[in-house]
């Protein structure tokens, strides 16, 4: 899947800046959902070999590919939609908003957008969503790698700020360790209340003065 064949199809139809868009972190109990948009070059000598759905790659492989993608991309943008936004407008709308902002943040304006899954964005350029696009489309796979590596690094930083939840291991997902910690400690600042409150035993989030 590391060849831009889908993007080349759109190039043949007159689109010269096809962006792939994906997210990481829709399902966790804590932390942001991270969205990335990327426009990859189509020349064979600039192809990044090994691009695939980020979930299929080892952390070490993802990190190496992320650096290659950043160095090679014609443009990329990574955006966070934080836990407050998720609680306010729900995870689906927060993801759509993050993807929209990632597309709009590209230094090279996209003229066609390919999104993973079944996601329609409020953008002013043509778009197409592709189920399992992160495993089927080169630029979407590249976007999934950028989003995943960015979010994993962020959650490791949060692990230092909010110890005891195992964020460096679970990345905010609802593992047994994480759920047990919520029951013992309550929620921290980066928990998604709408996702995690049921595990907190009514403790809720700390007041802003204690976060």
Image (cartoon, rainbow, N blue to C red):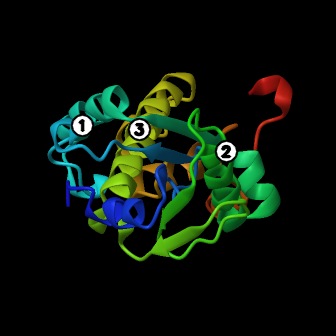
The residue that mark 3 highlights is 152
| Residue in the picture at 79% in, 61% down | 89
> Along the polypeptide, which appears first: circle 2 or circle 1?
1
Give residue 143's position: percent from left, percent from top: 41, 48
What element does badge 3 sit on? helix
Give residue 128's position: percent from left, percent from top: 52, 72
What element does badge 1 sit on? helix
| Residue in the picture at 58% in, 48% down | 30
Pointers 1 and 3 in contact (CB under 8 A)?
no
Residue 204 in sight in this render: no
Placement of 125 over or under 206, stated as above or below: below
The residue that mark 1 highlights is 65
Quarter of the rendering containing residue 109: top right
> Along the polypeptide, which appears first: circle 1 or circle 3?
1
The residue that mark 2 highlights is 104
Closer to viewer: mark 1 or mark 3: 1
Which of the pair 204/67 is nearer the observer? 67
Closer to viewer: mark 2 or mark 3: 2
How far is mark 1 from mark 3, CA to CA? 14 Å
Which of the pair 186/96 is nearer the observer? 96
Q: Quadrant of the C terminus?
A: top right
> Is 24 left or right of 191, judged from the image as shown?
left
> Is 144 left or right of 191, judged from the image as shown?
left
How far is mark 2 from mark 1, CA to CA? 24 Å
User: Quick one: label 1, few (<14), some, or many (20+) residues within 10 Å?
Assistant: many
User: Quick one: label 2, few (<14), some, or many (20+) residues within 10 Å?
Assistant: some
Give residue 66's position: percent from left, percent from top: 31, 35
| Residue in the picture at 37% in, 44% down | 40
């Amino acid at each position: 899947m590391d060849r831009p064949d889908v993007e080349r199809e759109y190039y043949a139809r007159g689109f010269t800046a096809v962006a792939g868009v994906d997210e990481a972190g829709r399902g966790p109990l804590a932390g942001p959902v991270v969205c990335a948009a990327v426009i990859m070059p189509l020349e064979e000598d600039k192809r990044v070999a090994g691009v695939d759905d980020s979930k299929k790659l080892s952390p070490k492989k993802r990190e190496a590919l992320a650096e290659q993608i950043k160095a090679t991309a014609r443009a990329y943008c990574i955006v966070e939609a934080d836990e407050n936004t998720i609680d306010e407008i729900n995870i689906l709308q927060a993801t759509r908003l993050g993807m929209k902002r990632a597309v709009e943040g590209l230094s090279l304006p996209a003229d066609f957008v390919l999104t993973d899954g079944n996601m329609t964005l409020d953008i002013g350029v043509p778009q197409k969503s592709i189920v399992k696009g992160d495993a089927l489309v080169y630029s979407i796979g590249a976007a999934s790698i950028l989003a995943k590596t960015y979010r994993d690094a962020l959650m490791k930083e949060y692990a230092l700020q909010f110890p005891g939840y195992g964020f460096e291991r679970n990345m905010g997902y609802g593992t047994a360790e994480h759920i047990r910690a919520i029951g013992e400690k309550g929620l921290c600042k980066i928990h998604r209340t709408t996702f995690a409150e049921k595990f907190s035993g009514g403790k809720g989030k700390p007041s802003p003065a204690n976060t």
